[in-house]
Amino acid sequence: MIVKPISWLLVKKDWRRADRLPREGAMILATNHLSWLDPILIAHFLYNNGHWPVILAKAALFSVPGLGRAVRSLLAIPVYRGSADAIRSLEAAGKRITDEKACVMFYPEGTCTRDPDFWPMEGKTGVARLALQTGVPVIPMAHWGAQEILPYGQKRPRLLPRKTFRVLVGEPVDLSKYDGRSLQADVLRDATADIMAAITALLAELREEKAPAVPFKNPAGGPGKSTNG
């Protein structure tokens, strides 16, 4: 296991409200996406709090020197976006939830945010589909600081001075109003918006700033069907 040593080396930690994580059972951890380094740092946080996550990560991350090995150590499910394999990746995550009671880490945006101020973008509906199909709790989480270490698109981290990685966990997102409803586009879109609103509110609290009233338009094509990356 190489995740924990990497995380101890790279960052100082400001971890808040880990008590909101379920003690046992399956869950979907839905969080914002700032950097290719996110999965490593979040996995360290979860591992220290009794959970070993399964992540959905875009296939390209598996070939990044150094980072790819760490991602593979997380038992990640590769996602080949824009293909039928993306749907199969979502199905694989659902199977891990039902068969293994896994903690599945999910980036609803489907890619690192392109918002110039690093606020979450519109979410893709894969997270809502997975949550409503499996019935497991969606735990929203916000984090801040990974983008200072490894900005999106760069492969060489900025290690010094050591940055602080901040995490804030929220209460489960209430999706009960969608119980029993057919998973039509409007239901998935609205449920996704509820999840993204929870993540954004947590990030605003963490940053002590006001979030934009309207989320940044997702360059991957808006709130369609997607997974992670």
Image (tube, rainbow, N blue to C red):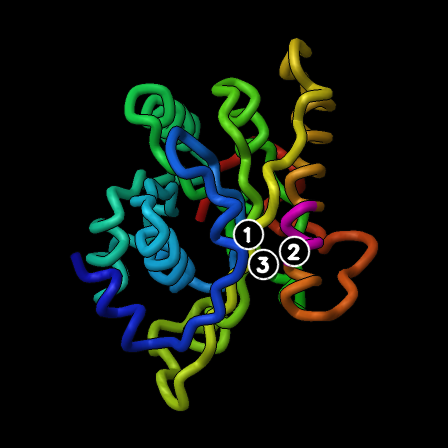
Residue 170 percent coordinates (x, y):
60, 48
Q: Quadrant of residue 76?
A: top left
Return the residue at label 3.
Answer: 113
Dominant secondary structure (helix, strand or loop) of the stretch shown in magenta: helix
Q: Given contact means CB atoms under 8 Å apart, are the residues at marks 3 and 2 in contact?
A: no
Q: Nearer the viewer, mark 3 or mark 2?
A: 2
Measuring 40% from the left and 38% from the top, which residue is drawn there?
23
Return the residue at label 2.
Answer: 202
194 within the magenta span: no
Q: Given contact means CB atoms under 8 Å apart, are the residues at marks 2 and 1 in contact?
A: yes
Instruction: From the viewer's side, name the closer residue of 168 and 215.
Output: 168
As helix, strand or loop, the secondary structure at mark 1 comes to: strand
Instruction: Check disc 2 and give the amino acid type.
Output: Leu
As helix, strand or loop, the secondary structure at mark 3 comes to: loop
Residue 85 appears in the picture as rendered = no
> In the rendered structure, which disc, 2 or 1, sits on the residue that comes first in sequence?
1
Instruction: Check disc 3 and give the amino acid type.
Output: Thr
Q: Residues within 10 Å of mark 3 (few under 14, many from 20)?
A: many
Instruction: Check disc 1 and give the amino acid type.
Output: Val
As helix, strand or loop, the secondary structure at mark 2 comes to: helix
Measuring 22% from the left and 68% from the top, which residue is drawn there?
5
Return the residue at label 1.
Answer: 169
